[in-house]
Amino acid sequence: MQIYIKGIEDERFTRPLQLIANLFYEETEVLLEEGGNADLAIELQLHETAKKIAVNAILKDQSGNHYRASFEKELAEEDTEKERFTKIKTAISHVYLTVLQEHTGIIQKWGILTGVRPTKLLHRKLQEGVPREEAHKQLQEDYLISDEKIQLMQQIVDRQLAAVPDLYRLQEEVSIYIGIPFCPTKCAYCTFPAYAINGRQGTVNSFLGGLHFEIRTIGAWLKKNNIRITTVYYGGGKPTSISAEEMDMLYEEMYSSFPNVRDIREITVEAGRPDTISPEKLEVLKKWNIDRISINPQSYTQETLKAIGRHHTVEETIEKFHLARQKAMNNINMDLIIGLPGEGTDQFAHSLSETKKLMPESLTVHTLSFKRASEMTKNKQKYKVADRAEVERMMNMAEDWTKKHGYVPYYLYRQKNILGNLENVGYAFPDQESIYNIMIMEEQQTIIGLGCGAASKFIDPHTGKITHFANPKDPKTYNDSFADYTVKKLNILKELFSREETPA
């Protein structure tokens, strides 16, 4: 699908306009210069003054139909160049989405939003003191978000503030993400840094040496500067892919290196794959007082698990869940994915009925996303997925089921190329929410990434400015350079958290 946009020449608009077009069509291309063969032509007329931007849009299709939209946005004299550009982009996106909705008959419930963290918008307005109803009105008018999604956002924001009452005051603390880049096999939809662990023992040993170094070095700096840790999250890959002995040494390193570990609000280990869980590994978790883990079925249909490359069985998921309960794991999360190949409402209803037999403390419902580098995306013809309407019915089933069984939504994020332009929602029993998930989504504090492929997000405690920093994704490069990357992270931390010494 080629869409010719007439009336703007600034290439900075190409990407956001293409992302919105992708909500309606597959494999879109946005052209700012007329090519002659475009499927659609949209003329944008911009009228900008010192106080206002007004945008008109006219869509003409090949059948001769015309669709029109207009939108105005106030500008302020004190707006920076970046703020002014953002407002212009919002106005253009507004009319662009409107004419595409009218042309296709498809209503986008998230409006013009294509970003990962929609709830941040509502948090920001509430932090600025905007009354709730006015905040909702602004979100609806500026971004064309539906009432349904605004209410979901508000529900989540309310639950987050109940779970973490000091959410807006945690800038002087940090959270830690620890990445273990190994898995038994790589799933077809996955793009995380995850390498098959079989036959890589030398690499594993080298990697763990670098990870221990990072934990010791970063931990020493945090201790020296009296910086508290809010949460620690072990992810990857699968952090239970390594042996029980290796896990034991890793958690011992954490306890000896990090400041005040017993005061950390939450430590999570994403066991995830049932085929990585053993009685010995659960005993190690219990030894170090870690009782929040994930055991992720993704689906309770065996044919689906085989199709996506997960080598565990449905029975093994259930068995490992009960084993974890016997080993005093008191806060278990499980993941389900809507829209996996070959699955529709019948299969998803079965997954929900099996979940009811276990009742984990939290349930994260993901919507399948065709991630650019995944095996599934590279071979789309092999993987038949449900259409938009059925995917939405499955999401509605999840909402109804979780509400009926006492779960409440507490975090939300979205992804590019997500089926049905929907979302991923974390549900939990009240007071069983993952604090780390809230922190990573709402970006209220620095999160330091340690390990292979771990991404750090440094947030200035005073300005809120975000600096991204990522460790190498492959184990060999990480093993060769972990010391250099640790020094670079320390330099950023020193700049963000430098404290003026009080004169004697």
Image (tube, rainbow, N blue to C red):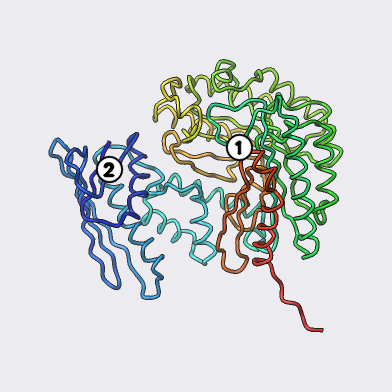
x then y, percent, for residue 289: 83, 42
Residue 319 at least partly seen: yes
Q: Nearer the viewer, mark 2 or mark 1?
A: 1
- In this view, the residue farthest toward the bottom is 504
Q: Does the rendering let one see residue 432?
A: no
User: Hey, what amino acid is under mark 1?
Assistant: Pro
Percent x, y of residue 120: 52, 54
Around disc 1, counting alpha carbons within 10 Å, would you say few (fewer than 14), some (14 to 19), or many (20 or more)?
many
Q: Residue at x 65, y 66 (%)?
A: 496
Residue 79 in the image, given as x and y percentages of width and height: 40, 71
Q: In which quadrant will I find the N terminus?
A: top left
> Where, quadrant-wise, is the C terminus in this rendering?
bottom right
**242 is higher (above) or lower (below) than 82:** above
Cβ atoms under marks 2 and 1 closer than 8 Å: no
> Identity of the amino acid at label 2?
Leu
| Element under disc 1 | loop
Q: State how far apart marks 2 and 1 are (Cα).
A: 36 Å
* x, y percent for residue 49: 26, 70
The correct choice, above or below, for 176 with respect to 407 in the image is below
Seen from the viewer's position, the closer of residues 441 and 41 is 41
Circle number at residue 193: 1
- Mark 2 or mark 1, earlier in chain: 2
The single residue placed furthest to the top in the displayed view is 303
In this view, the residue in front, 249 or 388, is: 249
In the picture as drawn, the residue positioned furthest to the front comes out as: 480
Q: Quarter-wise, where is residue 337 in the image? A: top right
Q: Nearer the viewer, residue 156 or 13?
A: 13
Residue at the image point whose x is 31% and y is 57% from the top:
91
Left or right: 494 in relation to 68: right
317, above or below 263, in the image: above
Q: Check disc 2: other Cα within 10 Å, few if <14, some if 14-19, many if 20+.
A: many
Task: Write down the residue under mark 2.
Answer: 100
